[in-house]
Amino acid sequence: MDSFREKGETSGSVAETDGARSLPKRDLPLGMVLSACPDVLDYAKGREIRAWRDFVAAAEQARPALGISPSAWMEAQEAMGPENAAITVAAILQRAERISGGGYLRNLAERARAGKFTVWPMVMALLRAKIEGSKPSASAGRAGRAGGGEIARPDDSSGGGNSSWTVSPALLKSLEKPRRT
């Protein structure tokens, strides 16, 4: 499975093998990234992120708290581009209790240089965990998903317009599939 994952991440094409698909080449929407990585808002000026420029600045502010050196941050930006490096830092921030920031970011930057890394799986894993965490328990006696298939932005008081976005049924279905081990 690992060889397929590396091949899928490298190619960026949509291929089906044993029901698994690689992810699209297109960029992730900022709203989706903020939903997956809400902790980065703590580092944003005025706790507000309206554009990728704001997101990159917030990730740069979070970097020292994660033990990521300026040189590791610079390498990641060169290898991945500023937005993808910021997404990676925000994803590390979400899992800070489980991930050592600097070494992990350097490793991912090296993989990005080799064409073997994309931010999509990180963000999808965080969204999957969020969706699984929001499902009502069987003891609650409710069926279905909380929020009717919508994932709200973490800070609805930001005044940034529409504070939620709808997840497509296809994305929800793919996120709900059991992970293979």
Image: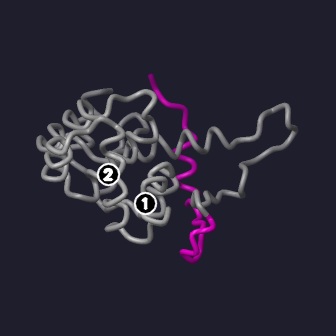
Q: Residue at x 37, y 60 (%)?
A: 28
For residue 37, side relative to residue 55 (left or right): right
The front one of 110 and 38 is 38
- Residue sitting at x 39%, y 48%: 90
Amino acid type, residue under disc 2 in the picture: Val
Q: In this rendering, is residue 138 above or below 94?
A: above
Whichever of callouts 1 and 2 sits on the residue coming sooner in the sequence is: 2
Residue 14, numbered label: 2
Q: Residue furthest bottom?
A: 161
Is 136 rendered above or below residue 154?
above
Q: CA distance from mark 1 to mark 2?
A: 35 Å
Asked whether, in this view, residue 67 is left or right of residue 70, the answer is right
Q: Quadrant of residue 122?
A: top left
Instruction: Report if residue 171 lies within the magenta region.
Output: yes
Where are the magenta residues, as a range?
156-181
* Residue 112: mark: none
For discs 1 and 2, the disc positioned in front in the rendered view: 1
Residue 36: image location, x then y, percent: 49, 50
